[in-house]
Image (tube, grey):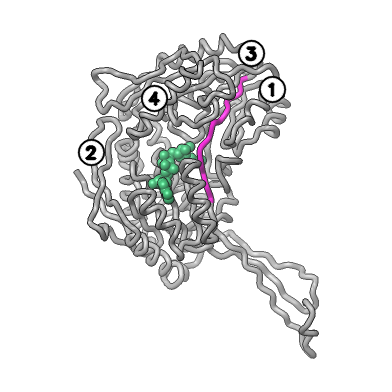
């Protein structure tokens, strides 16, 4: 079993307090690695290194073109190591190897996109309305960025956060989830191999209220970019506000998948299944509320139950597995609790509804893919994020009813719409309160497409050309070339 170290200032280094914590393989339930349980002093060391690299070090003196070239090099190294990194992710978080391989193979595109963008961010010269004045604005890196990530896709979040941050010229201190830290620590070796200067990319592992909180509090961290639950996001937002820091928050969801009776039923059924059972439902964009037009509700539900019942639960490393384990013991209990809550509130379970127990399943953290009908919008199962393979089905009458039900949530991350009517698709896209609307598809992401949430699902956007702005400050410079007598000093110029 390997014992890992933090990655600070270009070196792997032991935690100052000499403490480590276990990393558990969710499939076997066994400890498979040890990672540092860091503390505020480790954070201080990492932030000092990141601040030096930003203010004094070669990073700040490097041209944006050269920074971009390093990012392209990193993209190639991730491509080379994608199969190994994907396996580490599976050991860390129990998601399917097929899913993590797909993510890792695609991951380098974020580095290529933002690496290419690094030297294309231009300032502006204003045709300023003052005599004898030259005025321009340009963008500067916001400063040291603290990146705090969730356990469900640790390396994808690194690409989403760090590629635009480094393209903007920032340096980063990353804290991965305590449940899935190994892949981020392994990733740091590739950053070093690519030739990034020391201090540009740092990883400190540990608990949220210890390491995460210390990053948010640190006076030299200018911006927090966070992916995780809305409860933690709100805490970080308040803590950052007290220090006047910038934040981007990628939080949870209760996304509706809306199926109209004019849809291609087979496509829609596959899309709804991918929205809720893929990744064992442990994804922020899980389409956990199915809103289906009442005219097809019964038939559509039957179809879903058939597909769901055939999903194979098992070893996430095997290519024919559809549903892997729940990542953490706490999350496993939470998913089972929600199943009980739904039953107690009067929802009717038509698929699954409990633990998946089989002699050949080690570790114990498996749940059945589950579908509830007779769900009403007030039930907790219809309102709260479960983060597991649990679908709530509710019927609607018409478009207006669908919009009203879809928007009846504190969240606003994503929504799916299944219809052949493109006018309706556009009307729905406009009416839905969600950062992403997918029509006749679901769970599609790209480095060039902005992603993020409305309402309690977050603040800011990742990916897409504007993501770099989340890591930049605008500076305005005024230069007077007036000659002769000075202007009246007591009036505004
Ligand atoms: P979480 O909020 O428990 O933890 C996320 C990270 O925050 C972890 O690294 C944790 O250690 C850290 N943390 C916890 N308390 C902290 C504190 N007081 N100060 C600073 N950091 C702290 O979330 P999770 O259980 O790891 O992830 C699941 C959640 O993430 C779900 O709600 C899911 O919807 C959300 N998520 C959102 C997106 C998105 O892009 N919108 C993507 C994936 C997951």
Q: Is residue 83 visible?
A: no
What residue is shown at x 45% (from left), y 65% (from top)? 220
For ligand 1, give the image quadrant. Answer: top left
Boundaries of the magenta span: 248-259
Q: Which of 296 and 222 is in front in this view?
A: 222
SS of the residue under disc 1: helix
Q: Which residue lies furthest to the front in this view?
A: 344
Residue 341, placed above or below residue 138: above
The residue labelled by disc 1 is 401
The answer to whether the beta carbon of the residue marked 1 is less than 8 Å from any atom of ligand 1 is no
What residue is shown at x 58% (from left), y 20% (from top)? 376
Mark 1 vs mark 4, foreground winner is: 4
Category of crowding for the residue at label 3, using alpha-carbon neighbours closer than 10 angstroms: few (below 14), some (14–19), many (at least 20): some
What residue is shown at x 60% (from left), y 25% (from top)? 440
Q: Which mark is residue 31?
A: 2
The residue labelled by disc 4 is 336
**254 falls in the magenta region:** yes
């Amino acid at each position: 079993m390997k014992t890992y170290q933090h990655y600070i200032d270009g070196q792997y280094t032991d935690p100052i307090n000499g403490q480590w914590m276990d990393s558990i393989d969710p499939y076997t339930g066994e400890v498979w690695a040890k990672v540092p349980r860091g503390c505020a002093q480790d954070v201080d060391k990492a932030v000092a290194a990141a601040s030096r690299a930003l203010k004094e070090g070669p990073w700040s003196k490097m041209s944006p073109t050269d920074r971009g070239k390093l990012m392209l090099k990193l993209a190639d190294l991730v491509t080379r190591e994608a199969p190994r990194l994907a396996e580490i992710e599976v050991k860390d978080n129990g998601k399917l190897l097929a899913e993590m391989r797909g993510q890792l193979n695609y991951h380098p595109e974020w580095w290529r996109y933002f690496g290419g963008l690094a030297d294309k961010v231009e300032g502006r010269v204003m045709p300023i309305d003052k005599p004898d004045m030259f005025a321009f604005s340009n963008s500067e890196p916001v400063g040291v960025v603290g990146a705090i990530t969730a356990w469900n896709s640790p390396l994808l979040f690194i690409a989403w956060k760090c590629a635009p941050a480094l393209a903007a010229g920032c340096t980063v201190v990353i804290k991965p989830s305590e449940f899935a830290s190994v892949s981020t620590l392994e990733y740091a070796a590739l950053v070093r191999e690519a030739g990034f200067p020391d201090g540009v990319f740092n990883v400190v592992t540990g608990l949220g209220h210890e390491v995460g909180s210390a990053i948010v509090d640190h006076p030299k961290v200018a911006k927090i970019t966070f992916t995780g639950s809305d409860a933690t996001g709100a805490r970080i937002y308040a803590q950052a506000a007290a220090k006047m820091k910038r934040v981007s928050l990628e939080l949870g969801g209760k996304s509706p998948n809306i199926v109209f009776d004019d849809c291609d039923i087979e496509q829609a059924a596959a899309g709804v299944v991918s929205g809720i059972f893929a990744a064992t439902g442990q994804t922020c964009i899980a389409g956990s509320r199915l809103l289906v037009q009442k005219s097809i509700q019964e038939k559509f539900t039957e179809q879903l139950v058939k597909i769901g019942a055939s999903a194979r639960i098992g070893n996430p490393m095997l290519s024919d597995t559809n549903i892997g384990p729940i990542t953490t013991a706490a999350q496993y209990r939470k998913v089972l609790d929600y199943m009980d809550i739904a039953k107690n509130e009067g929802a009717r379970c038509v698929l699954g509804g409990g633990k998946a127990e089989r002699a050949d399943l080690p570790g114990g953290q498996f749940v059945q893919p589950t579908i509830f009908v007779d769900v009403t919008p007030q039930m907790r199962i219809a309102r709260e994020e479960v983060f597991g393979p649990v679908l709530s089905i509710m019927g609607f009458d018409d478009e207006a009813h669908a919009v009203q039900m879809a928007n009846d949530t504190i969240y606003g991350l994503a929504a799916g719409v299944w219809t052949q009517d493109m006018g309706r698709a556009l009307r729905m896209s406009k009416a839905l309160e969600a950062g992403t609307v997918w029509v006749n598809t679901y769970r599609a992401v790209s480095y060039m497409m902005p992603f993020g949430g409305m309402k309690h699902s977050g603040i800011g956007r990742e990916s897409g050309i504007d993501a770099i702005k989340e890591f930049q400050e605008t500076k305005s410079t005024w230069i007077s070339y007036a000659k002769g007598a000075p202007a009246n000093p007591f009036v505004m110029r």
